[in-house]
Amino acid sequence: MTLETRLAEIDSYIAQHRQNALDDLALLCAIPSVSAKKQAQQPCAEFVCTLYEKAGLTARLIPIPEAPPIAYGEYRSPNPNAPTVLFYNHYDVQPAEPLELWDSDPFTLTFRDDKAYARGVGDDKGHIVSRLLAFDAIRSVSGGELPFHVKFVSEGEEEIGSPHIGSFMETERDTLQADYCIWEEGGVNEEDAPYLYCGMRGIAYFELHVKTIAYDAHSGMGGSLLPNAAWRLVWALSRLKDSDERILLPGHYDKAIPASERDMELLASLPNDYEDTRTKFGLPDGGFLGGDATRGAEYMRRAVFEPTLTICGLDSGWQGEGAKTVLPSEAHAKMDFRLVPDQDPEEVHENLKAWLAQEGFDDIEVCYLGGQRPARVDPDHPFVQLAAETAIRVYGQRAVITPIVGGSGPMWWFSNFLGLPITAPGIEYPGVRAHAPNENIRLDDFNKGTRHLAHLLLQLDAIA
Amino acid sequence: MTLETRLAEIDSYIAQHRQNALDDLALLCAIPSVSAKKQAQQPCAEFVCTLYEKAGLTARLIPIPEAPPIAYGEYRSPNPNAPTVLFYNHYDVQPAEPLELWDSDPFTLTFRDDKAYARGVGDDKGHIVSRLLAFDAIRSVSGGELPFHVKFVSEGEEEIGSPHIGSFMETERDTLQADYCIWEEGGVNEEDAPYLYCGMRGIAYFELHVKTIAYDAHSGMGGSLLPNAAWRLVWALSRLKDSDERILLPGHYDKAIPASERDMELLASLPNDYEDTRTKFGLPDGGFLGGDATRGAEYMRRAVFEPTLTICGLDSGWQGEGAKTVLPSEAHAKMDFRLVPDQDPEEVHENLKAWLAQEGFDDIEVCYLGGQRPARVDPDHPFVQLAAETAIRVYGQRAVITPIVGGSGPMWWFSNFLGLPITAPGIEYPGVRAHAPNENIRLDDFNKGTRHLAHLLLQLDAIA
């Protein structure tokens, strides 16, 4: 059988068996595995193992102390010299709320207009099912076996920042040795072009807590005398970033590696969503941070190569209707730093505490809620290039390559700790509404993403 | 009948008829006239008129556009040359919540341990009933008539900042001409000494609203590009007051009249609650604003003679459990300025808007929720001195005189707009828990405050 024939048969297999895969996906989406609520994680992990076994993997739950287990699947190819592909996915989902904004039940996979709707249908349960369907398709043209070894990791806490992935990775480092890694999700961009991303920003998430007095006071009686927690918080925050968006922590930018010429070249080849994003958020022309300079390539660079500090929430005193004359005893802020290589969240934590103390705010308690290191993969690695190339047959064009995305994930553990090249064909499109009501995938993207992955995996020997 | 005899008979009348007055108070407290909820205001105003008429006043409701009516009572003494006394009270109360912290129903007057408990029993329904009982007592020794004219104003919005008292005062200025004014509440201090206060700070209450983008964004995608409402708010607030508690609005202190020598003398004669307040709020010694300097007379001065700016509430983005990586589109602050004579809330409003615009924050919407002008009464006015003197027979000591209190009220309309001397014998004590669960008065204070008022009113001719 020629490669051409085999790829055509894979495509045909996927088309014929898609409904079976979607039936599995419906069962998987019906398990409301919301990690933020510690909900249904164990049964979901068990069901993922069932799906692994159906796809010919040997499955087991790997326990993690104080965390839901990893659903782990393994397959040994009869060819001992075959490469090993490690898959990183997650079986947990974001909360479905606000429920009233869904047009169908979030935990019932529902088909409308050639789309499938459910919480997790894209992020990330659809990808798990797509990958297992790709294995079946490859087997169907490879004598019932896969020409590569598989290690399949699905974790249960990705949506809450993967707080325990590090301890798992450190414990199971030997188990997880591999040659390539397929990342959890991917798909097509605004122009329906497949994209591959080669990195993620890091994150360090903090709460600041201030408590100044034993309980709230009357502003008329206490305003002249009692330290106000809300003011302490405001003054402390104003010493973390100035109104030019410059983060004031000493040395914060020292380890931030600027975009290279190659990065700028890659960014220039990507669709520029300046106008779409501007319109979506109701900003005037030139209204992005950085003003008129934030256009074109600089807009694209700034979106992903700039360290940020975002206040995610503020909370103090009276927030209800009307005028309550209260002097708050407590105030709280939530905030995240987004980090670029080689910034380190633990270092940011230490710097933040030291800087607040130095600026006179040692009354402010810094709670580190979690962090992830930034990660980069060489966009010119043969594995990434092969993934770009194998897109042509499916999408009619090479995949475009994004040097790094603005979001964060546990990629560093795979790219740096394990040292793997990483890429991610996938089934999503820009309308996926991940984390939002009416999360959905287009059924055509499910086909294409599954085909792309299968084509890539079938041709790994091209880069052996 | 000698003055001595008449005062003794007044005391005896009050003792004998106190239970009738408390029965009326029970009916008045049973009406849940919570102005913050626009609840039961009209029926409460009508019932106050019923009580007026029972006490021999001619009563009517004076409507105010878009506000609950004033319950207005009038009495003309047979002596046309008698002085006119204007009473300012209010029939509305604070919300009773949190209900679970009450030991008895907040709208059922309940007697325990020689105290009476109910929402409004002190602030301010108990004072209305006390004043009407004082009238009855005076009549009983004055041939069935009062030796002064009465104008009795009870408003229904004091607890929400008297937003419509100004329009009422301007419309009814002629109706309200008088010689003396009795203010809504008073009583005894921590040392069980009667006190009289001669002013209130003003207030200007604002909400700041910021909206930067059409809706909340993902911090990973937007942190580098989208203006964050929470940051805008923090930076704007940090330009309103610095961490030395100095308000930064240009000219804000220009009209603030400092405490005079006489004020400092009066403050020095008051009990100093430094230790009590410090302990109550869990502050270390020297922990008040201003640090070690804020002790003794300076502590007393700072409490009431210092303009303040208090953040009462902050609200933006995610305030729930854990790490949500959101970039908030909106942020809100509530804050009040406390003003000393002759600062003006309308001027503060204009200055605030101009200053924010000047500092680059014209995207911040300033909502003026209401204000009251600061008010002062001459502590050496014969009316105030007579009130201090007439305390001796009831309390065994002259009343102590407080030059101004830290809280705010519509006193300016009576002290400055009508130009009246003002004082306030009353029935409260420091444990009254006004605005809090288990609001209560001591029955002994009810007797004493009523006697004090009656004694003062009977002897007005001493200062004619």
Image: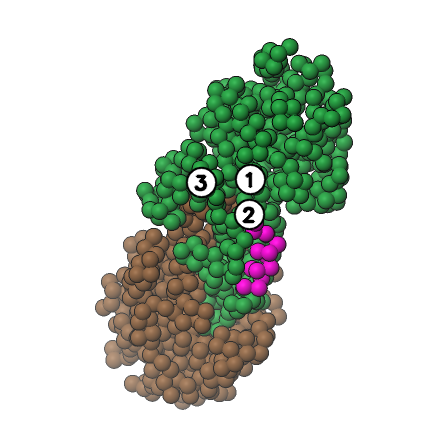
Chain colours: A green, B brown
Q: Is residue A199 above or below residue A28?
A: below
**In the displayed structure image, the side of residue A455 where residue B24 appears, left or right:** left
**Residue B434 screen position, x and y as percent:** 50, 66
In the picture of the structure, the residue carrying the numbered disc 3 is: A264
* Mark 2 in CB contact with mark 1 (< 8 angstroms): yes
Q: Residues within 10 Å of mark 2 (few under 14, many from 20)?
A: some
- Give the chain of mark 3: A
| Chain of the residue under label 2 | A
Mark pair 2, 1: CA separation: 9 Å
Rendered residue at 57%/27% (across/down): A386
Foreground mark, 3 or 2, reads: 3
Residue type at mark 3 is Met
Residue bounds of the magenta highlight: A341-355
Membership of B332 in magenta stretch: no
- Estimate how packed mark 1 is, as few (under 14), some (14 to 19) or many (20 or more) residues with alpha carbons within 10 Å: many
What chain is tagged by disc 1? A
Mark 3 packing: few (<14 Cα in 10 Å), some, or many (20+)? Answer: some
